[in-house]
Image (cartoon, rainbow, N blue to C red):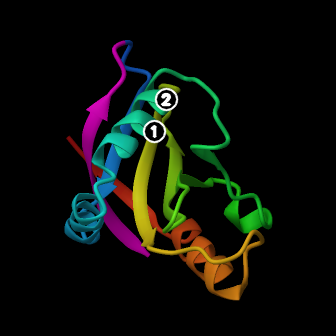
């Protein structure tokens, strides 16, 4: 499915970017503001842009071969929310992490069919990136 994403943050070295799905941008931003999760979002973005690994904040959702490019920003706590992302590697080796779909509340440790469907949906997105 063809979608559009806009770059909102970039690493100092220009090798990593954070982008947001234009169709879901308002919903994601509203959720982060309502739940006071903007600082956590900033922390996760800075971790990604710095090239650091922290599986408590951001990790692959490697449930099957279709979903290898799908990752999750994790907002653990009372809500245990997720923002599912698609990682896109450009020809010049830059990495773009696109925040695609919001899961406001994850109630279980394992991915149930609801989460699997959402992750597979994100895997099927084909993004056109705008600056």
102 left or right of 33 in image: right
67 vs 79, nearest the viewer: 79
Query: What residue sits right under mark 1 in the picture?
Result: 44
Residue 16 coordinates in the image, percent (x, y): 43, 28
Q: Relative to residue 71, is residue 26 depicted above or below?
A: below
> Under tag 2, what secondary structure?
helix
114 magenta-colored = no
Please report contact status of discs 1 and 2: CB closer than 8 Å, yes or no: yes
Query: What residue sits right under mark 2 in the picture?
Result: 47
115 left or right of 40 in image: right
- The secondary structure making up most of the magenta span is strand
Residue at the far top in the pictured view:
13
Question: Which quadrant would the N terminus be assigned to in this image?
Answer: bottom left
> Under tag 1, what secondary structure?
helix
130 vs 27, nearest the viewer: 27
How many numbered marks are there? Answer: 2
106 left or right of 10 in image: right
Using a 10 Å C-alpha cutoff, classify the residue at mark 1 as few (fewer than 14 neighbours), some (14 to 19) or many (20 or more): many
- The answer to which quarter of the image holds residue 119 is bottom right
- Identify the residue at image location x=49%, y=29%: 47
52 vs 69, nearest the viewer: 52
Residue 35 coordinates in the image, percent (x, y): 31, 63
Q: Which residues are magenta?
A: 1-12
Question: Which quadrant would the C terminus be assigned to in this image?
Answer: top left
Query: Could you give the CA–CA distance between mark 1 and mark 2, rounded to whole angstroms?
Result: 5 Å
8 left or right of 72 in image: left
Residue 41 coordinates in the image, percent (x, y): 37, 45
- Identify the residue at image location x=41%, y=34%: 43
């Amino acid at each position: 499915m063809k979608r559009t994403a806009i770059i909102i943050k970039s690493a100092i070295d220009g090798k990593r970017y954070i982008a947001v799905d234009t169709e879901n941008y308002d919903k994601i931003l509203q959720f982060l503001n309502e739940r006071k999760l903007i600082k956590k979002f900033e922390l996760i973005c800075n971790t990604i842009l710095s090239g650091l690994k922290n599986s408590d904040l951001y990790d692959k959702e490697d449930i099957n071969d279709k979903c290898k490019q799908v990752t999750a920003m994790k907002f653990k706590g009372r809500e245990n929310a997720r923002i599912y992302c698609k990682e896109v590697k450009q020809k010049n080796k830059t990495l773009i992490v696109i925040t695609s779909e919001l899961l406001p509340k994850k109630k279980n440790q394992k991915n149930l069919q609801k989460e699997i469907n959402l992750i597979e949906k994100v895997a099927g997105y084909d993004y056109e990136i705008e600056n």
